[in-house]
Image (spheres, rainbow, N blue to C red):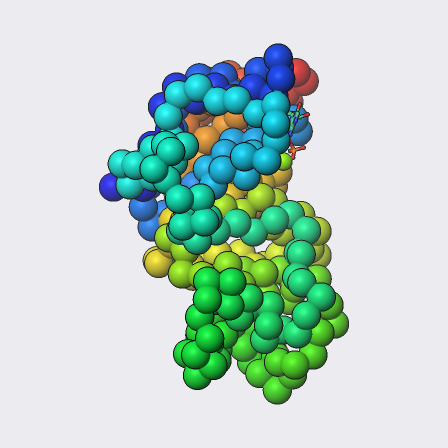
Amino acid sequence: MNRIEVENLNIYFSQAQILKNININIKENAITALIGPSGCGKSTFLRSLNRMHDTSPNFRKEGNIFLDGEEIYSPKMNVVDLRKKVGMVFQKANPFPKSIYENVAYGLRVHGINDEDHIAQVVEDSLKSAALWDQVEDKLDSSALSLSGGQQQRLCIARTIANKPEVILMDEPCSALDPIATAKVEELIHKLKKDYTIIIVTHNMQQATRVSKYTSFFLGGEVVESDLTEKLFVNPQNKKTEEYITGRLIN
Ligand SMILES: Nc1ncnc2c1ncn2[C@@H]1O[C@H](COP(=O)(O)OP(=O)(O)OP(=O)(O)O)[C@@H](O)[C@H]1O
Ligand SMILES: [Mg+2]
């Protein structure tokens, strides 16, 4: 089933058109990878899915983005609810300068929840889901900044999970991590797909093939090709896709 349907999406910043006529369907409880060269609009697209551009005064969009059939840019859409439903994990782990516990509890507190037993349970569950609990259970009061880079990224994923999102957007979540930490985060992403719809931007072709079921290839603000990952990498329909995935794309 489609969780997100993007129809004829154009995005502009001032006069510059960044995304051109994007049509993508994002399937429920599956991982979709977005690949493409630097500057092709992957992050711009990802960020449009939970309205992260709302604060850019020169942002303009045409076309539609439906989440479960509801247009997310409709005046009826509550942006706080949208961001709760569509969580985001960034390239560089960005824990708050607070304790490990408070990082995960943060979203609940922001939403006015103050039942400490409930919060403690959600913190534990989220850290377990993020495969971090065993490493931090006896130091929940330590600063999040004392964790390693890979642990910080998993903490940020735990913080996102604590909000009970339905969709998780990940913008190059492993690009600042070493191969071991990357493997751990990938393992986690793999585990999460049973419960979440995940869209991941990656420059790493192996990562796309390892973690995702579907892949969309972006180039120059357009989607060149979307398909099952296996098919797109083994038998790309477009010459540009083939050139990109084999490292031969010049422009
Ligand atoms: N807020 C903004 N205002 C103006 N231009 C922007 C804004 N955000 C992105 N752009 C432009 O949109 C284009 C696409 O950028 P984007 O960050 O989406 O690329 P990307 O595919 O994520 O690249 P990378 O792989 O390097 O992260 C770039 O030319 C960028 O300068
Ligand atoms: Mg980007």
Residue appearing at x 56%, y 72% in the figure: 132
Using residue 149 as the reference point, say whether residue 114 is left or right of it: left
Quadrant of the picture in which ligand 1 is shown: top right
Q: Is residue 132 above or below residue 216?
A: below
Q: Is residue 236 above or below residue 251?
A: below
The quarter of the image holding the N terminus is: top left
Residue appearing at x 46%, y 66% in the figure: 112
Q: Is residue 1 above or below residue 235?
A: below
Using residue 61 as the reference point, say whether residue 141 is left or right of it: right
Q: Position of residue 61 (x, y in %)?
A: 48, 22
Residue appearing at x 43%, y 79% in the figure: 115
Using residue 28 as the reference point, say whether residue 169 is left or right of it: right
Q: Quadrant of residue 183?
A: bottom right
Could one spot residue 168 in this view of the protein? no
Q: Nearer the viewer, residue 162 or 198?
A: 162
Q: Quadrant of residue 149?
A: bottom right
Q: Position of residue 79 (x, y in %)?
A: 44, 44
Q: Nearer the viewer, residue 97 or 245?
A: 97
Could one spot residue 73 in this view of the protein? yes
Q: Nearer the viewer, residue 164 or 147?
A: 164
Task: Check the image and name the residue furthest to the top.
Answer: 15
Q: How many marks?
A: 0
Task: Check the image and name the residue furthest to the right.
Answer: 146
Q: Position of residue 45 (x, y in %)?
A: 52, 31
The quarter of the image holding the C terminus is: top right
Q: Position of residue 117 (x, y in %)?
A: 44, 83
Residue appearing at x 57%, y 15% in the figure: 17
Task: Check the image and name the residue furthest to the bottom.
Answer: 138
